[in-house]
Image (cartoon, rainbow, N blue to C red):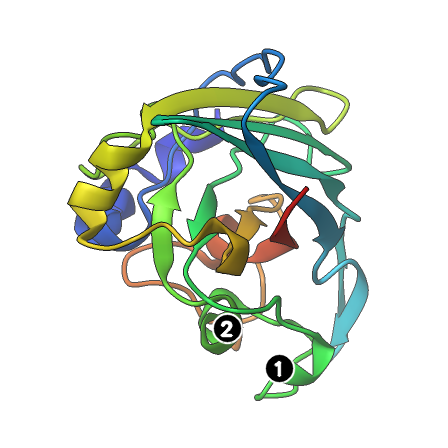
């Protein structure tokens, strides 16, 4: 399975973006009371990209992310479709103010890679892995099913998250980003990644702004 390709690199870069495979976590119905912050996840890097004599096809990902906040209880539910089947998909709440666009491809290689996206979506604020309340390096992100879909649900306490972050969550100013494509089709060397991690695992494929409903 594809997680074995990441173990060595993930330990070196875990504080930035630890990545491996894990079974998709079923989404449970989020609490209808309290406040919902909803992100409409739109595709990034989708379609065909020609670099030299090579053509790379990135799937068109879409979905939604909901952060429900009721008192001190915070629940994140995510539903994604259209990603590469049977592949891990790191996902995070990022601290930046907007999703990147095609013009953020500063080296003009046809891809907005994880480094080029950082000025827009910002650094990782919360890793949406199997333990949202833990800020230790994680090796437990969802893996898509055979149809290229996955569902995720995890809960944490708002006060704990803010204590770890040493600041307010400010969910209405944040973005959710989904990463990960097919490792069997290596990207060109111009596509940048985080230290120790392959570009296929960090390429952003969907992004959405959290908006209070």
Q: CA distance from mark 1 to mark 2?
A: 18 Å
- Give the label on residue 189, or none: 2
Q: Can you give x and y, in whole percent of width and height, for residue 168 in the image?
A: 30, 52
Side of 161 relative to 97 (left or right): left
Where does label 1 land, which residue?
104
- Circle 1 packing at 10 Å, graded few (<14), some (14-19), many (20+), is some
Q: Can you give x and y, in whole percent of width and height, for residue 67 in the image?
A: 53, 34
Q: Write the residue at 57% across / 88% down.
A: 107
- Which quarter of the rendering shows the C terminus? top right
Q: Can you give x and y, in whole percent of width and height, for residue 13 in the image?
A: 24, 53
SS at circle 1: helix
Dot 1 and dot 2 residues touching (CB under 8 Å): no
- Give the label on residue 213, or none: none
SS at circle 2: loop
Compared to 3, does 206 lie above or below? Answer: below
- Circle 2 packing at 10 Å, graded few (<14), some (14-19), many (20+), is few
202 or 40: nearer the viewer: 40
Side of 142 relative to 211 (left or right): left
For discs 1 and 2, the disc positioned in front in the rendered view: 1
Compared to 126, does 189 lie above or below? Answer: below
Side of 27 relative to 140 (left or right): right
136 or 19: nearer the viewer: 136
Q: Write the residue at 70% across / 60% down.
A: 44
6 or 145: nearer the viewer: 145
């Amino acid at each position: 399975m594809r997680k074995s390709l990441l173990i060595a690199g993930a330990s070196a870069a875990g504080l930035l973006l630890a990545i491996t495979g894990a079974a998709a976590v079923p989404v449970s119905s989020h609490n209808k009371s309290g406040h919902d912050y909803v992100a409409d996840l739109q595709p990034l890097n989708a379609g065909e990209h020609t670099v030299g004599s090579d053509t790379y096809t990135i799937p068109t990902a879409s979905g939604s992310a909901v952060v429900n906040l009721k008192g001190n209880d915070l629940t994140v539910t995510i539903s994604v479709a259209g990603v590469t089947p049977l592949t891990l998909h790191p996902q995070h709440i990022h601290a930046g103010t907007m999703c990147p666009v095609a013009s953020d491809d500063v080296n003009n290689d046809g891809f907005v890679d994880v480094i080029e996206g950082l000025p827009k979506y910002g650094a990782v604020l919360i890793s949406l892995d199997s333990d949202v309340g833990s800020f230790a390096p994680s090796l437990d992100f969802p893996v898509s099913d055979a149809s290229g879909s996955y569902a995720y649900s995890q809960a944490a306490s708002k006060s704990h998250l803010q204590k770890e972050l040493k600041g307010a969550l400010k969910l209405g100013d944040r973005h959710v980003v989904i990463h990960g494509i097919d490792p069997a089709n290596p990207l060109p060397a111009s596509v940048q990644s985080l230290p120790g991690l392959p570009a296929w695992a960090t390429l952003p494929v969907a992004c959405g702004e959290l908006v209070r409903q």
